[in-house]
Amino acid sequence: MAAMTGATTTDWDKPGSDEPDGPVPASRRLTAEERRRQLFDVALSLFAERGYAAATMDDIAEAAGVTKPLVYQHFDSKRALYLELMDVFSHALANRIGAATAGAEGPRQQVEVGMAAYFEMMVDNEQAFRLIYGRDAPDDPELGEALRRVEDTLAQAIDPLIDAGLDPEHRLLLAYSVVGMVEGASRRWLDGQADRPATTSEDGGGAGRRSRSTEEASLMATRVADLAWAGLRQVHRV
């Protein structure tokens, strides 16, 4: 039976979490938590690259350098693994936005730092966002519902930031509207990253690409926050 006693520990809510923490010495055996995290990251990469349907548990085992039975010791099925990925990601995203906005001094600053936290997390976790917003969404009601829960969690994180004296239903509607806006901007950026040529040592390699991506995230956050704030400021209490 797979160990499903709690959500997999991840660093999704920390800057730079797409970067490996460094190789584990070949002579040291991974702990159960380290192995689970490794399988989690490998599955994320394969789901983002190939889509849920095309990636198999055999693929995950091969990419991780382990046997398929070992994968099943940690996750009951590919479906269970995917659903946990969605759950952990959505809560990490909500926590990052919540932490960023907690110290904001007013509504405008809340919108700005909330957007900054969102787009910075996208740059730091491109594969996770590609899994959420990729074009190859699973054609499965339960898995589709998992994706919608990510949107729900994000809307619930945005809802308290809309301080306009509105009734709860009106405020939640606006929160989902903001979610749609940032999702559109996210897809635009992700598509652009896929079309961008690979970096070389001459232009800074991976570090150069991350620096440019961080600058782009900051610019996106500013532009989308400006649009969101301009709209929210004109909301009528009807």
Image (cartoon, grey):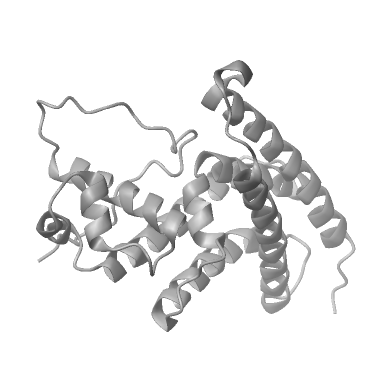
Q: Residue at x 67, y 39 (%)?
A: 217
The image shows residue 176 at horizontal and vertical percentages of: 67, 69
The image shows residue 155 at horizontal and vertical percentages of: 60, 65
The image shows residue 154 at horizontal and vertical percentages of: 57, 61
Q: Residue at x 13, y 39 (%)?
A: 31
Asked where in the image residue 11 lies, by quadrant, the reply is top left
Q: Quick check: can you spot residue 94?
A: no
Q: Residue at x 23, y 68 (%)?
A: 77
Figure disc tally: 0
Viewer-proximal residue among 25 and 171: 25
Residue 155 relative to residue 227: left or right: left
Q: Which quarter of the rendered picture does the C terminus lie within? A: bottom right
Q: Quick check: can you spot residue 209?
A: yes
Q: Which quarter of the rendered picture does the N terminus lie within? A: bottom left
Q: Is residue 43 above or below residue 207?
A: below
Viewer-proximal residue among 191 and 152: 191
Asked where in the image residue 53 lies, by quadrant, the reply is bottom left
Q: Is residue 104 above or below residue 16?
A: below
Residue 7 relative to residue 51: left or right: left
Viewer-proximal residue among 40 and 97: 40
Q: Is residue 184 above or below residue 41?
A: below
Residue 59 relative to residue 109: left or right: left
Q: Residue at x 64, y 46 (%)?
A: 195
Of all residues, the one furthest to the top in this rendering is 202
Q: Is residue 231 above or below residue 100?
A: below
The image shows residue 74 at horizontal and vertical percentages of: 17, 57
